[in-house]
Amino acid sequence: MSKATNLAHMHSQMNTKYRKKLPGTNLEYFDAREAVNAIEPGAYDKLSYTARLFAENLVRKAEPENLKDYLSQLIYNKRDLDFPWYPARVVCHDILGQTALVDLAGLRDAIAQKGGDPSKINPVVQTQLIVDHSLAVEHGGFEKDAFAKNRAIEDRRNDDRFHFINWTKEAFENVDVIPPGNGIMHQINLEKMSPVVHAKDGVAFPDTMVGTDSHTPHVDALGVLAIGVGGLEAESVMLGHPSYLRLPDIIGVELTGKPQPGITATDLVLYLTEFLRKEKVVSAHVEFYGEGVQHLTLGDRATISNMTPEYGATAAMFFIDQQTIDYLKLTGRTDENVKLVEVYAKEAGFWADSLSTAKYERVLKFDLSSVQRTMAGPSNPHKRVSTTDLAKNGIAGAWTEEAGKMPDGAVIIAAITSCTNTSNPRNVISAALLARNANAKGLVRRPWVKSSLAPGSKVVQTYLEEAKLLPELEKLGFGIVAFACTTCNGMSGALDPKIQQEIIDRDLYATAVLSGNRNFDGRIHPYAKQAFLASPALVVAYAIAGTVRVDIEKDPIGKDQQGNPVYLKDIWPSDAEIDKIVTESVKPEQFRAVYDPMFARGAASTKKISPLYDWRAQSTYIRRPPYWDTEGVGALAANPRTLKNMRPLAILPDNITTDHLSPSNAILRSSAAGEYLEKMGLPEEDFNSYATHRGDHLTAMRATFANPQLLNEMCLDDKGQVKKGSLARVEPEGKAMRMWEAIETYLGRKQPLIIVAGADYGQGSSRDWAAKGVRLAGVEVIAAEGFERIHRTNLVGMGVLPLEFKPGTTRKTLNLDGTEIYSVEGKITPRADLILVIERKSGEIVKVPMTCRLDTAADVSVYEAGGILQRFANDFFASEK
């Protein structure tokens, strides 16, 4: 590996004195226990699971002269030194993975233009890209051949994107691509890709990874430290840079009790999501242990780990135990791999029994037996409501049904989707059994409900067929429409035009119910005003009921063949039957049959591939990125950052999500992006989603703040209330207009911008365009009460300065109205105190102390370079000298 190939300085020396023989194998391993105990005798036994993983990584990868200082951070719970972490893998879905590779292809162009060798720009860490975020459910599960029809549309719409992705797997080293139609990255990772323990170059070591999706911690259920990052951070890891970390808060969550009969993993995780949000575990690593863990299947654990970003944590770890081993066997892993995991975990201190002495600075307790059947919503995954309390919470209520009309609260979308639930066979089987029982009583799906089943794995189809239950789901309209991330990601497809028109004409309160992990405003479908998360079985029940106004536990959801009312309890399957069918129908050979051919490597291509991509000039999907151009696009090279005389683009409330910042759902013709695509000659039926166009900055820029549910507090109606929509107010004129027109206006003036916001800014999906879009718009600073971890990192990666208000200070206490001019004073260092200088329209000057949320020296270095993309080019040429 040349120095130029690896842009980061990867230390080649190893701490060889800690390299030992792994008993019962022909491998060696690095003994972190000995290294830790050499500093503080007996300290290793007190370390958490996460700290042990970090310790192993440091002993194996860090420079010897700094090892003691790094390990001391873990031993003494110190947080005054950054330490490096080298993940073993990078896993990407096609949206952010493609965007990251577009950036690397653009970097190759920039290197070539300056006389460098572009072929030296490659990922040096194993990078796996799964095409799973591109399919929209245009054909519902009640249509014949829906899967084939949807896949054909996906291929047609995404031809430019797939052409580029196919080029990357030939042009770049260390890039593997799983083509569309094969499943969701997290579920494939859980069922196949993660070995849990690697054996490479004669050394055994734990699997660790970053992934370009906030639900990457799904695989934490296997004891694998997996963290969701934005595309920018993933690019850095791909190219060999370590992630520099401060020791995170590591919180123990002791699980007690046993789930009650009839309670699904979805119910458990929605309770835990609410509980952990209230306990403020944001950015922490949580570790689940206790006797309650033994009552959770690996699928249950994966459901809990998958929802990590919904409760705000960074990771959600379960320890390696016999359940882990049994799951690896069930999913068809090799005997050698399974044996290695057990031997290594027991020897190196990662087996559950050895964690009984672990100490945590903070411990939470949660009783699994307290969980009732539940849903979450509307609009937030942590807003839990028990199904027995729907009426009390104003969700269920009196409603009437008129012939030929949709009712109030109509469920227009009912989707069994997302890796959260379809990686759990118990959840899928329970839905299928409920469908069977409903069919036996003559119940039907309501005609306005667009229903679908989109499993995260092809194995789901296999075991449903084995159990003879797939036809039961199909009969109720839940045929398989995709093996992909669909409705949960806003790819729910078009509604029947008549249904859509009725919603518009009657201003109907229409809803969605899905077994996903996200239900933010405007995410699921533009005409679903709110959305609820529920177990797959409840999704089927709501498709039968047809409205969320039904009190699902008390009211009949339909009538049988004799006209008698049928209640949920009449068709809910028993735990015993669910477990029996799972045991009989889910088999290792099914996983091997699906995954062996999927991961089989063919002969290497002999075709010579150019290291430079031939960009398609008219593409609205893939365009050479502008980040290294001397002229720049938007606010990059044309507007060097000054942090002076900034105008506010928006003043925003709490809980602004990356869906507000850069929506992922369908593009409407009336939107700025829709108008642009029409101008480019794209037919409306092929506008596709915002997400799929993120490889083209000219389209993606127009998605910035394009969410119709946005509340910009600078934009008020005649009554002084905040208007909802993609709106802004240009100053000093005080003229309200669409957000994109405001951005264009400010770009024309070369006006630097700031965004002021409340708490939890940037929560939600790990979306790098939520940071790229604001930077290209000219935003230099985000001043907020708090940031979600991934988005804060992405802002830094784009050269945007995140500033945090001190406790007690907010946009409201400062009485900001958007007419102000802002500047920043002070020396930028990690976590420095800076001053936000606010000049009011009256001429009054207010100086507000702020915390600089460049948290590490590495953050400052990236920020000073203008962002991580510019840093890459600088590093390359420095290494070539």
Image (spheres, helix red, strand yellow):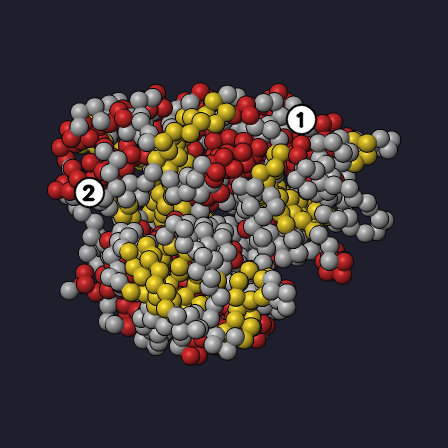
Q: Distance from label 1 to label 2 (Cα)? A: 53 Å
Q: Which residue is at the front of the view, 341 or 264?
A: 264
Q: Position of residue 486 (x, y in %)?
A: 57, 49
Report the disc number at residue 144.
Answer: none
Report the disc number at residue 573.
Answer: 1
Q: Is residue 612 visible?
A: no
Position of 465 with respect to 789 (left or right) is right
Q: Quadrant of residue 350?
A: top left
Position of 752 with respect to 264 (left or right) is left
Quadrant showing the C terminus = bottom left
Q: Classify mark 1: residues with Cα within 10 Å, few (<14), some (14-19) or many (20+).
A: many
Q: Quadrant of residue 262?
A: top right
Q: Which residue is at the front of the view, 375 or 264?
A: 375
Q: Classify mark 2: residues with Cα within 10 Å, few (<14), some (14-19) or many (20+).
A: many
The residue depicted at 58 percent of the width and 72 percent of the height is 675
Residue type at mark 2 is Ala
The residue depicted at 56 percent of the width and 34 percent of the height is 266
For disc 2, the marked residue is 62
Residue type at mark 1 is Pro
- Is 460 situated above or below 569? below
Q: Is residue 262 visible?
A: yes
The residue depicted at 47 percent of the width and 39 percent of the height is 277
Helix, strand or loop status at disc 2: loop
